[in-house]
Amino acid sequence: MKKKLLALGVAAALSLSLAACTTPEEGTNGDTLIKVGFSQIGSESGWRTANTDSVKASLSKDNGFELTFADAMGKQENQIKALRDFITAGVDVISFTPIVETGWDQVLQEIKDAGIPVVLVDRLVDTTVEDPYVTWVGADFRLEGQLAGQWVKENYPDAKIFELQGQLGSGAQIERELGFHEYMAANIIGQATGNFNREDGKVAMEAALAKYPDMNLLFAHNDDMGLGAIEAIKAAGKVPGVDIIIVTVDGVKAGLEALLEGEINYIVECNPVFGDQIADLIKKVYADEPVNKENIVVDATFEHGTFTQEELDQRKY
Amino acid sequence: MSQLDPTSRQSVKAPNFVIQVFTHRLFWPVVGLILLWVACGIALPGSDTAPGFWSITMMDGHLFGQIIDILRAAAPILLLALGMCLVIATGGIDLSVGAVMALSSSVSLSYLISSPTRETLPTVLIAIGLGLLTGLVVGLFNGTMVARLKIQPFIATLIIMVAGRGVAFAFTGGRIESVVSPPFKFLGSGFVLSLPTQVVIVTIVAAIVMISVRMSALGVLVESIGVNRQASFLAGVPASSILMLVYGLCGLLAGLAGMIYVAPTMATNANAIGLMLELDAILCVVLGGTALSGGKFYLSGTVVGALLVATLPKAVIYFGFPMQITPLFKGLVILIICIAQSQTLRDQFARRSLRRSVALAEGSPS
C-alpha cells in the first residue's frame, strides 16, 4: 500500500513538473519569451562561474528569455545529451561552449536538421557539418597572450621565464602560449601544465622552482594556477611579486586581490561578463537579423601599482 | 631434463636470506621508489646557487626541500590510501573518496565563508569538525550499503562518487571562492616541529591506524572477511560491524584528506578537488603489494606506494620531459613495478633458476 502511495506521489509530482514545462510563459512586456537552451562546460575555474552567472543574469525572463541551462560538469557526452534534449524540447536558439573542438558532427547535423540556429560561446568547433553555427562570441586568447608578452618585453626584457600552461590542448592554452611566445619565446626556460587549477599549479611550481633556480618571472595561463604557484613560492622561502615576477591571464576576484597586494604584478583580463553580448546576438539571430560571424569580447589589463581598491570593489565578479 | 620436477627437489635451495629479501612484498615498491629518487637526484644535482633534489635546508626553523615537498604532496594521498587499503583487504573498494574530498572541503570552507568569526580558532575547529563529520557520514552510508544491504562495493561507492560532487556543488553554488583564515591555512602551510603540519598529522594518523590494526585482532578479522565473508561470519566474525568500521574509517580519512588538500590554497572547487584521486589511492595500495581480491594487506607498502605516486608528477618536471608525455611516463613506471611484482612471472623465474641450479648440481642432465 505504502509503495503504491509513493508511486502515485511520484507520478503526480512528475506530471506537475511536466505541466510546468509545457505552460507557455510570457515576459513582463507581454511578448512570447525566446526559448534558449544553453550548455555550459562546467565550473572548472572562477572565470567559468563568472561567465555562467553573467549568462544566467542576461538571459532572464525580464529580458525576454526562457532559459534552460545545462551544466555538463566537464564531460562532452553530457553536453551532447543536453543538446539533444534541447532539440526534443523544441527551443528557439541553442547556445553552447564546446568543451573540445571535435566530436560534434552528428549532434550538430541533428540540430541543423531541426532548423535550430546555434550561437557558439567562448570556444570553436571543428566539424564537417556545413555552416554549423550562425555566430560566435568570445575572447581572443592569442591577443591575451600577446598583451602579456608585450608587457614583459617592455618591463623585463631579460627575464628568465617559467610558463604554467593551462589544460593541454585547450584553446586557451594553445593560443595564449602562441601569443606570448611571439614576444618572449627566447626567454622561456621551462614549461609545465597546472590544468587551470590551484592545486596542480602549486605542485608544478614546487618542482619547477627546484628545476629552474634562475627563474625570475612566471607566466601562468590563468589566475588560479598563479595563485597556487604563489603558495609554492612562499613555501620555498621566496617572495612572490618581488623575487619572482608573476603575470597571469583572467582577472578573477582572488587574482585581482593578489594584484592589489603586489603578489601578482600584471593581469591580462579575460572578461567573462559578456552575457549581454550573448543575449543581444541571440535576439538578432532569433529575429533573423544579420550578425557578424565573429564577435570579440573586449579585454582590459591591470598592473600592480595603478590598480586600486575602488576598481576592485566595482567589479561584478 | 623433462623428468625434473623442481618442486620436489628439496636439497637444492638458493640462500634463504636472499630469497626472503627478493620475494618480500616491499622489495619491488621500495626498489622502484629508490630508483626514481636516484634518477631525480641525477636530474637535479644542485649547485652553489641552487639546492638539489636531496638537499634539505633549514630556514626560519622550518625544513625546506624537494623531499619535504614530496612528503607534503603524499600526505592527502596517503590518508586516502590507508582507508582504501583496509577496504580492499575486505574484498571491497571505495570509489567515493575523491568526491568525499570535494564534499568535505566544500562543507568546511562554506561554513568558514559564512561565519563572521572565520579567523578565530574555535570557528576553524568547528569547520574542521564539520568536514570530518561529512566524511564519516558518507563512509557510514557506504558501510551500510555494503554491510547491511549487501550491495556490491563497486556500485555502492559509485553512488557517492557520482552524487558527492553534485552535493558539493549545492554547497558552493559551483563557485570557486577563496576565504582567508590563518588557523585553517596552518593545516596546509604551517609547520610543527620544523615539519609541514600536514606531514605531522598524517604521520600520527598513519601510526594510529597501523598500530590499532596490527596490535589488535582487527587486521586478521579484516583479512578473514576478504578471504571469505561467509566463512568468517560462520566462524563468529562480526563481519557487518567490521565492514561498517572500515568504510566509516575510509570516509573519515578522506574527509581529513580533503581539508589538508585545500588548506594551502583555501578555495572551494567542487569540480577539481580530489578528481581521479580515488584511482591514485587504489594505485598506492596495489603498488604496495596488496591484491585487489582482498585478504592480506600491507599498510607499510601502501606508504611506499603513496610516496611513489606523489613523486611521479614532480619527476616529469625534474626530468624536463614535455608535459604531453606525462601520462605515458606515469603509465610506464607503474607497468614496470607491476611486472616486477607479478606472482606468475616471479614463479616462472624462480622455477627457471631452480632448474638451472639443479642442473648444475647434477652435472650435465642430458
Image (tube, rainbow, N blue to C red):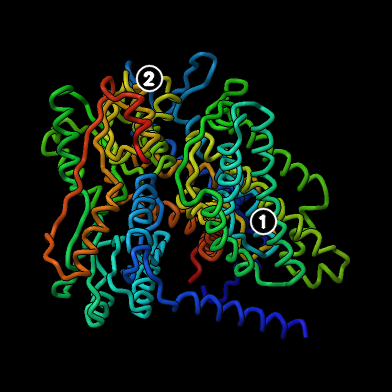
The picture places residue B106, in percent across and down from the top left corner, at: 56, 46
Task: Tell me if A20 is positioned left or right of B49 in this view.
Answer: right
Q: Which residue is mark 2?
A: A239
Task: Tell me if B124 is positioned left or right of A255 in this view.
Answer: right
Residue at the spot 26% in from the left edge and 71% down from the top edge:
A104
Instruction: Please say if A230 is above or below A132.
Output: above
**In the current view of this chain or complex, which residue is farthest to the top?**
B60
Q: Secondary structure at mark 1?
A: helix
For the question of whether residue B99 can be seen, the reply is yes
The picture places residue B151, in percent across and down from the top left corner, at: 68, 72
Q: Secondary structure at mark 2?
A: loop
Q: Quadrant of residue A46?
A: top left
Q: Quadrant of residue A124?
A: bottom left
Q: Which residue is mark 1?
A: B138
Residue at the spot 75% in from the left edge and 41% down from the top edge:
B211
Q: Nearer the viewer, residue B124 or B27?
A: B124
Instruction: Please say if A73 is above or below A129.
Output: above
Check disc 2 and give the amino acid type.
Answer: Val
